[in-house]
Image (tube, helix red, strand yellow):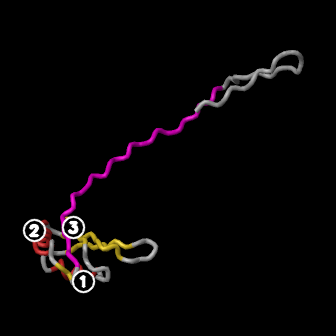
Amino acid sequence: MIKLFVGGFPMDITELELVMLFGSHGDVSTIKIVRDKKTGNCKGYAFLEMKDEEGAARAVEALDGSFIGERLLSVKITEEKQTPVKKASPQFKRTFSSQSSYSKVERGGEIKKKRPRKQF
């Protein structure tokens, strides 16, 4: 699968119209017009996946720099970014000792020993 970036098309174009435009150059697998989350309005660019590299190259050659209405169409093959592999985070481990680190002191003239802070 070859992924294409398509930008500069009219804001009122539909997915079907884009598929029909690119379908004459090769088989279109998926299409995603990017829209604003709140309003749902088109942002003016989309991503297409074509099944073969030859069809994608023909589409870029034929449609890049062409006009749809009064808008200049921009078509480019996108490079696949390799997603970084997340390293496993170290598990938070807490160890408890069986011996207490503080002692109770009688209320007399002796100074009461404070408990130590927990260490993480």
Q: Which residue is mark 2?
A: 54
User: What percent of the width, then of the height, locates residue 98?
Assistant: 66, 26
User: What percent of the width, then of the height, locates residue 49?
Assistant: 23, 69
Locate residue 68: give its quadrant.
bottom left
**Disc nearer the start of the sequence (2/3):** 3
Pick the quarter of the image with the C terminus: top right
Q: Which residues are magenta?
A: 71-97
User: What percent of the width, then of the height, locates residue 10?
Assistant: 27, 80
**Disc nearer the start of the sequence (1/3):** 3
User: What percent of the width, then of the height, locates residue 41?
Assistant: 39, 77
Q: Which residue is mark 1?
A: 17
Mark 2 Cα-neighbour bin, 10 Å: few <14, some 14–19, many ≥20: few
Left/right placement of residue 48 relative to residue 43 reads left
**Disc nearer the start of the sequence (1/2):** 1
Left/right placement of residue 10 relative to residue 116 reads left
Mark 1–mark 3 CB contact (< 8 Å):
no
Q: Classify 27 as above or below 112.
A: below
- Taking the magenta stretch, the answer to whether it contains residue 72 is yes
Q: Secondary structure at mark 3?
A: strand
Q: Which residue is mark 3?
A: 4
What's the residue type where badge 3 is placed? Answer: Leu
Q: Classify 22 as above or below 119.
A: below
Q: Main secondary structure of the magenta part?
A: loop
